[in-house]
Amino acid sequence: MVVKLDANSCKKIGGMPINGKCKLAKILVGKKPNRTDSFFYYDEDEIASFKGKKNAYSLISSGDIRIEIDDESYTKRDLDDAIEKYKLTDKKLRSLEDKERLEWLNNNWFEVEFKPKNSEYWQSVMGDVAYDYDGAIRLLEGAIVKKELGK
């Protein structure tokens, strides 16, 4: 993950300056084409990570999922069946919602956790969540810059 940050600030937080930008996090799970909704990342433990000067950071998918499509219920255990059966993509999810064939009973989200250097406990960045991949990456970038630089 590369963000706009001057070289000094980048080094200060433990990033790697590259051509006027700052490489911050290691992407562990790439963006899936046409599947950017957090729904499609339900089984991923960690999406991206970063070890800063003050904290370690982890972008995760969190929360339970329970949906109904055409009166059939699906949970985390059998979401792959629904994804395959309905050939689900971001566009298809919206279409099924618009046609009132899809009902969200529980949904998941992306959130950032951080662990201070001298701690063994992870903490959540409370109140900050994202529901799509790009928003989640921006959420992680923001948490890193805010906590490492105090901006």
Image (cartoon, rainbow, N blue to C red):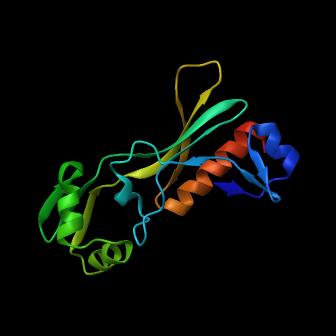
* Residue at (59, 19) in percent of width and height: 119
Q: Is residue 151 left or right of residue 90?
A: right
82 is higher (above) or lower (below) than 13: below
Image location (x, y in percent) of residue 148: 74, 37
- Outermost residue on the front side: it is 18
Q: Nearer the viewer, residue 103 or 143?
A: 143
- Outermost residue on the left side: it is 72
Image location (x, y in percent) of residue 40: 35, 59
Image location (x, y in percent) of residue 140: 60, 48
78 is higher (above) or lower (below) than 69: above
* Residue at (36, 46) in percent of width and height: 63
- The image quarter containing residue 53 is top right
118 is higher (above) or lower (below) than 107: above
- The image quarter containing residue 3 is bottom right
21 is higher (above) or lower (below) than 118: below
Quarter of the picture containing the N terminus is: bottom right
Image location (x, y in percent) of residue 19: 81, 59
* Residue at (65, 45) in percent of width and height: 143
Q: Is residue 58 left or right of residue 101?
A: right
* Residue at (65, 31) in percent of width and height: 55
Quarter of the picture containing the C terminus is: top right
**Count of marks, rendered view:** 0
